[in-house]
Amino acid sequence: MSKTKDKRMKTMDYVLSAVCATLIAVCSWISVPTMVPFTLQTMAVFLVLELIGGKRGTLSILVYILLAAIGVPVLAGFSGGMGALLGMTGGYIVGFVFIGLTYWLSEVLCGGNRVVRIVAMIVGMAICYVFGTVWFMTVYAKQLGPISLKTALSWCVIPFLIPDAVKLVLAVTLGARLRKVLRIYEETNA
């Protein structure tokens, strides 16, 4: 690969990662009102991984978290800053990195098999749930006192299992269609 083409691909990697970090931010602002309101940011994380792959997708997730950390209002409810990120539910946001890393690892070890990618996102989401729940329980205990695992799961995980499964299915379906149109994944992962 020539130096010019290599530089162009690196530039494209950064542009794609920035655009996808923006997509995650925009989807975090979209709230679906239900008994327990949820945003579309998890769907965006899944979609980003499907569109640009694990390496670039994980970079997008890290950029999104960095933007939140420096105070850009990219989190749900147009919030941002270290206070929001280090709050009770911040572990679930940081846990998105595990979804990206699991997806990336599946690509490295197993290639681009669709079933493997879906399983990787499910495993990554499970790791995100575990990490976020431990984080939630720790911060909650410091601020308000001890909380049982059962209560934490009933507040922070169980209400989101079905919506997150639906988001994953939508992201995989939409990602497959968009990849055909945009041809991003194949060109950037060649």
Image (cartoon, grey):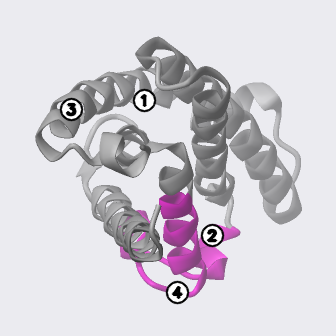
**At 74% from the left edge and 34% from the top edge, which residue is drawn?**
130
Magenta stretch: give its range: 59-86
Which secondary structure lies at badge 2? helix
Hey, what amino acid is under mark 3?
Answer: Leu
Q: Is residue 48 visible?
A: yes
For the residue pair 59 and 76, the one nearer the viewer reads as 59
Residue with the mark numbered 1: 164
Q: Amino acid at mark 4?
A: Gly
Taking the magenta stretch, the answer to whether it contains residue 63 is yes
Q: Which residue is mark 4?
A: 71
- Which residue is painted at 51% across and 79% down in the image? 67
Circle 3 sits on which residue? Answer: 174
- Secondary element under disc 4, as helix, strand or loop, is loop
User: From this viewpoint, which residue is outermost toward the left?
Assistant: 181
Mark 2 vs mark 1, CA separation in Å: 21 Å
Q: Residue at x 33, y 40 (%)?
A: 186
Q: Residue at x 38, y 37 (%)?
A: 50
Proximity of marks 1 and 4: CB atoms separated by less than 8 Å: no
Q: Earlier in the sequence, mark 3 or mark 1?
A: 1
Q: Amino acid at mark 2?
A: Leu
Real-space CA distance between mark 3 and mark 1, rounded to the nearest whole angstrom:
15 Å
Compared across the picture, whether 23 is left or right of 135 comes to left
Q: Is residue 55 left or right of residue 126?
A: left
Q: Which mark is in front, 3 or 1?
A: 3
Q: Position of residue 118 (x, y in %)?
A: 47, 20
Q: Nearer the viewer, residue 140 or 25?
A: 25
Residue 123: image x %, image y %? 64, 24
Say left or right for 160 vs 70.
left
Mark 2 lies on residue: 85
